[in-house]
Image (cartoon, grey):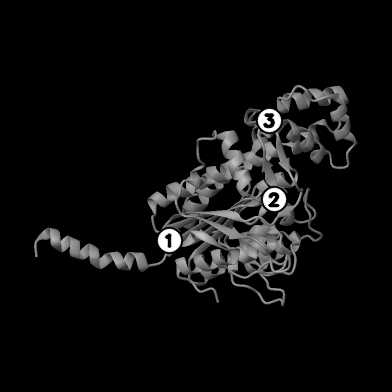
Amino acid sequence: MNKKFFLLFIVLLILPLTTLSTVKNIILFIGDGMGTAAVDLSRMVLLGKEKFWDFENTRYIGLQKTYSENLLTTDSAAAATALSSGHKTSNGLLGTLSDATATKSILKAFREVGRSAGLITTVTVTHATPAGFCVSMPDRDELAIADEYAETKPFDLIMGGGRQYFVPKSSTASKRTDNLNLIKNFQNFGYTYISNTAQLFELTGKTPKIIGLFSESSMPNALDRNYLNTPVPTLAQMTRTALNVLSSNPKGFFLMVESGKIDFRAHANDTAGTVWEVNELNEAFKEALSFLKKDPDTLILVTADHETGGLTLLYPRLQLIKSQKATNELIVSLIKNKDINQSLKTVHELTGIKDIKEEEIKKIKESSTPEIELSKILNERYEVRWSTVGHTCANVNVYAFGKKAELFTGVYENTELAIKMFSAAGVSPN
Ligand SMILES: [Zn+2]
């Protein structure tokens, strides 16, 4: 046999083995509340209508149906349970069925076989989406979830906001009713605790267990970061470190990365705020994409748990939206104690919209929901409509990259996404 044929023979021998084998690493991005219209609008505003988000640049695209067991419109708890375990459950339930049976999540399945697991979010680490991957609880009480984390240590790495649930009541800004220090508890079990960007950058891949709590409550909105100038990391910076740390396990890892504030901004119908949180997800996704180039034995998924806000795009005034310099949340907090004239000046400055009138500022100030009032005023100018301040039951997109990405095309239930992950990784859902 000459050399050429011998090589061909070897390739033909190996090929079926490689396609049959399973994926070592899974990186799952969840844009909380990220419907198709949010993806479209943010792309048009920040990149221009002809461009694409990096996470859109794949031919392996699917749609998942988001309804929960008891309601057409899901909450993040039931959705996280479906996405993590492959079981529909009722709204409000975390990693548990209506009959109180605990579900087994993809994260648990990874750890069972000695692979590592991590969770990252821009909201509190005890919020429904990360919690739905690692606890089994009948409600979304964040204090109880923090206690459960300390009790069971269900992850190797967790990063985000929510320090208030981990520090004793004697510390300022604690939400605890006792003097337990859960951070100390984690440290006693070998976790490295970090609380700012400098410490995040100091970590090497050799720190196996990490708890990173960068703010008391949720982390600042992406659009407000420059204005506030607080030393908190971006979702991309957390993702880069997490990938570094988790990939030190030769058996592989599961990492869930949540851009959690898409949902928060969409609940407030804050158009510019929402747009920048989708960008936050895309920036983090780019870190995963460069990791995939280094380790092709990796599957990356980008999806949402549900749509929030019922965003409708008419003739969106892209440049106007792009010129907003702070979220509606921050603007409202800045004008709270200012008189009408000062408030008008701040709103003009931070939105770039000069025709906002005194009566409109008065309306914001008199409203019991001032942020929604400001959203209404701005959205009229932006020619963007939101139909609800809650969730909707629309399907959401799934974008897949890397090994086994082809499994994720088509239209399917949110539970099916989990089943596909179990099968891609060769871990048991039972
Ligand atoms: Zn929500």
Q: CA distance from mark 3 to mark 1?
A: 40 Å
Mark 1 lies on residue:
404
Disc 2 residue crowd, few under 14, some 14–19, many 20+, Cα 10 Å: many
- Front residue (pair 281, 306): 306
**How many numbered circles does the render carry?**
3
| Disc with the residue nearer the chain's start (3 vs 1) | 3
| Disc with the residue nearer the chain's start (2 vs 1) | 2
Q: Quadrant of the N terminus?
A: bottom left
Q: Is residue 68 above or below residue 263?
A: below
Residue 49 x %, y %: 54, 35
Residue 299 x %, y %: 45, 58
Describe the element under mark 1 as helix, strand or loop: loop
Q: Is residue 162 visible?
A: yes
Q: Please tell me whether mark 2 or mark 3 is closer to you in this view.
A: 2
- Front residue (pair 17, 221): 17
Q: Is residue 211 visible?
A: no
Label 3 within 8 A of ligand 1 by Cβ: no
Numbered badge on residue 324: 3
Q: Amino acid at mark 1?
A: Lys
Q: CA distance from mark 2 to mark 1?
A: 29 Å
Outermost residue on the front side: it is: 314
Mark 2 lies on residue:
308
Residue 329 x %, y %: 76, 39
Q: Is residue 229 above or below residue 418?
A: above
Disc 3 residue crowd, few under 14, some 14–19, many 20+, Cα 10 Å: many
Q: Amino acid at mark 2?
A: Thr
Question: Who's the residue at 43% across and 63% down the image?
Answer: 24
Outermost residue on the right side: it is: 366
Q: Amino acid at mark 3?
A: Gln
Label 2 within 8 A of ligand 1 by Cβ: yes
